[in-house]
């Protein structure tokens, strides 16, 4: 499949999120993500606003669902989301409920393996339960807590190839990646590249001398889209 660039709108103000979304789409971003902070702050109203402003753009609602899966997925689908996120650490019945809602309301289900004792097994279980995509995710608190103890901060890249090899669905790597690392994830076989809006604004290494955030995002999109097709095992030729 062709690599996808997704921008996570990890903002709490709806006007700021819409402004960033406009910048991202002008730069060539493929998908918009209503990030968890945005979902908490604005909920369905925020997703509706994104859908109204961008009627043809896929919208990921990063719900991080742990329970009440069917209703949460239904609500976001009806608000205009095309993708919803359920956690691998939730009960298998919750994952099944989200998958069923995905079928009933025409949305894709992304399963997130954050916090799994065995990240590869967690990814495999998400696929087996019917998730359309896997998010391989090292959490913010986990990374910071480990770093505070003076230990090496974990990275999604540590096991990304193993996760990709374990499943037949598209994979996305999330959690503490630099812009260069995120751009490189298609080379690991993970075609869904996610860029956090604050990261795109603040990161120095990629954006040094590149100008404003729109120019940075445009360069990211050019690099990712220029990678070429990424082989996904379950994709039909």
Image: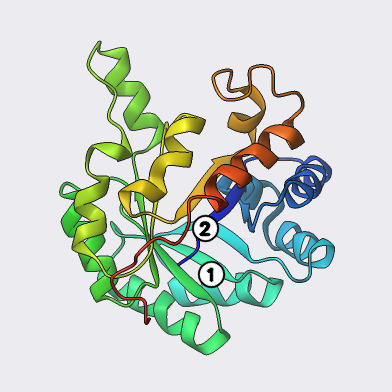
Q: Quadrant of the N terminus?
A: bottom left
Q: CA distance from mark 2 to mark 1?
A: 8 Å
Q: Residue at x 32, y 31 (%)?
A: 142
The circle on residue 72 is 1
User: Residue 227 vs residue 67: left or right?
Assistant: right
In the rendered view, tell whether residue 186 sits above or below residue 145: below
Tell me if label 2 and label 1 are in contact, CB under 8 Å.
yes
Q: Residue at x 40, y 72 (%)?
A: 132
Residue, disc 2 = 63
Residue that lies at the very extreme toward the bottom in this rendered image: 104
Q: Percent position (x, y) of residue 184?
A: 42, 40
Residue 54: quarter of image: bottom right
Q: Which element type, helix, strand or loop, lies under badge 1? A: helix
Q: Percent position (x, y) of residue 75?
A: 62, 73
Q: Residue at x 27, y 29 (%)?
A: 154
Q: Which element type, helix, strand or loop, lies under badge 2? A: strand
């Amino acid at each position: 499949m062709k690599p996808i660039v997704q921008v996570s709108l990890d903002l709490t103000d709806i006007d700021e999120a819409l402004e960033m979304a406009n910048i991202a789409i002008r730069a060539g971003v493929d998908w918009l993500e209503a990030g968890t902070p945005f979902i908490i702050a604005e909920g369905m109203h925020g997703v509706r606003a994104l859908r109204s402003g961008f009627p043809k753009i896929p919208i990921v609602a990063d719900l991080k669902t742990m329970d009440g899966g069917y209703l949460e997925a239904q609500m976001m689908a009806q608000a205009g989301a095309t993708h919803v996120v359920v956690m691998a650490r939730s009960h298998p019945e919750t994952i099944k409920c989200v998958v069923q809602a995905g079928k009933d309301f025409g949305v894709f289900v992304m399963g997130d393996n954050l916090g799994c004792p065995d990240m590869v097994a967690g990814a495999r279980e998400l696929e087996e339960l019917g998730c359309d995509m896997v998010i391989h995710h090292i959490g913010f608190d986990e990374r910071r807590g480990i770093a505070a103890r003076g230990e090496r901060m974990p990275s999604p890249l540590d096991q990304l190839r193993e996760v990709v090899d374990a499943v037949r669905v598209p994979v996305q790597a999330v959690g503490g990646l630099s812009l260069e690392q995120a751009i490189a994830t298609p080379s690991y076989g993970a075609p869904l590249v996610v860029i956090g809006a604050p990261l795109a604004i603040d990161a120095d290494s990629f954006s040094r001398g590149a100008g404003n955030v729109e120019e940075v995002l445009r360069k990211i999109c050019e690099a990712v889209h220029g990678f070429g097709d990424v082989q996904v095992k379950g994709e039909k030729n």
